[in-house]
Image (tube, rainbow, N blue to C red):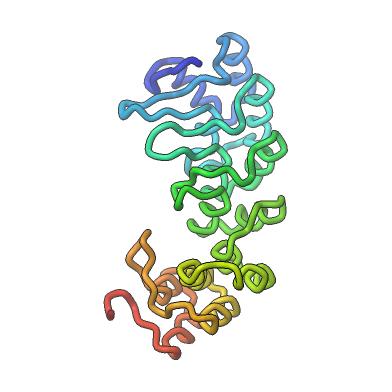
Amino acid sequence: MTTIRNDEPLAVAVTTAIRGGDLTALRKLLADNEGLATARIADDSGCSRSLLHVLTDWPARCPNGALTVAALVDAGADVNARFEGTHRETPLHWAASADDVDVLDALLDAGADIDADGAVIGGGTPLADARAFAQWHAAYRLVERGAKVTLVDAATLGLLDHVERLLPSVPKQEVDAAFWGACHGGRRECAERLLDSGAELNWIPPWEPLTPLDAAVRHGFDDLAAWLRSRGAESAKEL
């Protein structure tokens, strides 16, 4: 497998074509450079990524995104290629993290693993990334396309039927995390159900020092925040 430094002319040219949606230039580069579709682009830190990662890199939503997926896959790109470095995310993780639904659909249609692990969010799936980063369109599309839904996913997205089904079989810490997720997602009905099931009102997660109240306030869910206050919730600074 070929590795190209990100400042080499070929890397610059193919990145420019992909990010600009220039399919003519991309196809010519792929035809003129054997193995380019599966090449890795590396930076000075030693991390490397695939061309599909180039397409889905934040903020994603490149022109002709779905067609670019098709062009790269047709040329041999691995739709489940992993980032190599501080995490192991696939292009689908990145599309989900950027709410790029068109590219997300194209990746899935090309065979991307909808439940691939390796997310920066607890090593989880693309859905874990989407709901953690409040990328709601991508999150719901992943559910529509058949992604496995955890209790935290369900609570964050307001899927009360999934919450009811999953709640009896999960440990206490997951109930706490799901309650936090419900507040992060502004889902009062799920939050009420989880609090009544024993969730810790002021639980602070390991990923950031915010209580459920803080999570609701951050996203402007004022009614939910008022309800949490009425139940005795506090911010992290108040604890």
Q: Residue at x 55, y 20 (%)?
A: 38
Is 53 displayed left or right of 139 in the figure? left
Against 139, is 226 above or below?
below
Query: Residue drawn 58% across and 59% down?
Result: 136
Q: Is residue 88 left or right of residue 161?
A: left
User: Can you name the residue that lies furthest to the bottom here?
Assistant: 230
- Give the percent coordinates (x, y) of residue 31: 62, 11
The residue sitting at 52% across, 42% down in the picture is 94
Q: Quadrant of the C terminus?
A: bottom left
Measured as percent of width and height from the top left, residue 9 is found at: 42, 15
Q: Is residue 49 above or below residue 57?
A: above
User: Could you say where residue 77 lies in the image, as x and y percent from the top left?
Assistant: 61, 24
Q: Quadrant of residue 95?
A: top right
Measuring 65% from the left and 58% from the top, which residue is drawn there? Answer: 140
How many badges with numbers are in the image?
0
- Looking at the image, which is closer to me, 121 or 186? 121
Residue 4 location, quadrant: top left
Q: Position of residue 73 (x, y in %)?
A: 66, 26
